Amino acid sequence: MDLKTAIKQRKSVRRYMDKKPDWRKIIRAIDAARFAPSAGGQFALKFILVSDEKKISELAKAAQQDYVGTAKYVVVAVSDDSKLVRSYGGKGVRYASQQAGAAIQNFLLVLTEFGLVTSWVGHFYEDQVKSALEISEDLHVEALFPIGKETKVKGSERRAKPDLENVIYFDKWKNKKMTPQEKVSFDAI
């Protein structure tokens, strides 16, 4: 699958087959995350691959989202911004968060390439996740990713993404005209 196809096909899925996905594919997706940009070459993100059913159940409770508990694997992204804060002061926290987003996108695209699905879970009680997985208090849980193969049972319809012309400005805020003026669309670039 080429990158453009993976970008367009990636979606959030909350219903998974009972069949356990190949854990090696998940590891390869995690491996892709480490190639994301990092401030000062300091990669701050780590991943925990959870397969223990009891722990997955605890994560579902922490997220208050039952579907998390139906996945055979959950990946938890955890950042340690301490080195970045030492190097960049308060901005290190922001850099760690930006790095996490970039790394997670790599992870999501490779999952899509391998035919696996997930949903980015950002709502959870962090203290409960940390307790369940014995994560140090000084670390930050960025997100949870229940992973599986998509079930054939259809859920809600996929939401339309905004058109390119509705998310881009030129040279200044709210300027929708490009100089020289040309029609901008994803297929044209």
Image: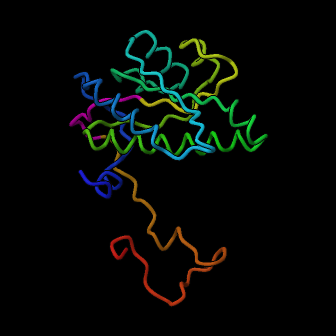
In percent of width and height, residue 52 lies at: 39, 11
Up-down: is 161 above or below 1? below
For the point 39% across and 59% down, the residue is 160
- Residue 180 is left or right of residue 109, and the answer is right
Q: Residue furthest bottom?
A: 180
Up-down: is 142 above or below 57? below
Secondary structure that dominates the magenta span:
loop
Up-down: is 69 above or below 175? above
In percent of width and height, residue 65 lies at: 48, 27
For the point 49% across and 41% down, the residue is 103
For the point 35% across and 76% down, the residue is 188
Magenta range: 146-154
* Magenta span contains residue 148: yes
Based on the displayed image, in which of its 4 quarters is residue 96 positioned?
top right
Based on the displayed image, in which of its 4 quarters is residue 26 positioned?
top left
In percent of width and height, residue 127 lies at: 65, 19
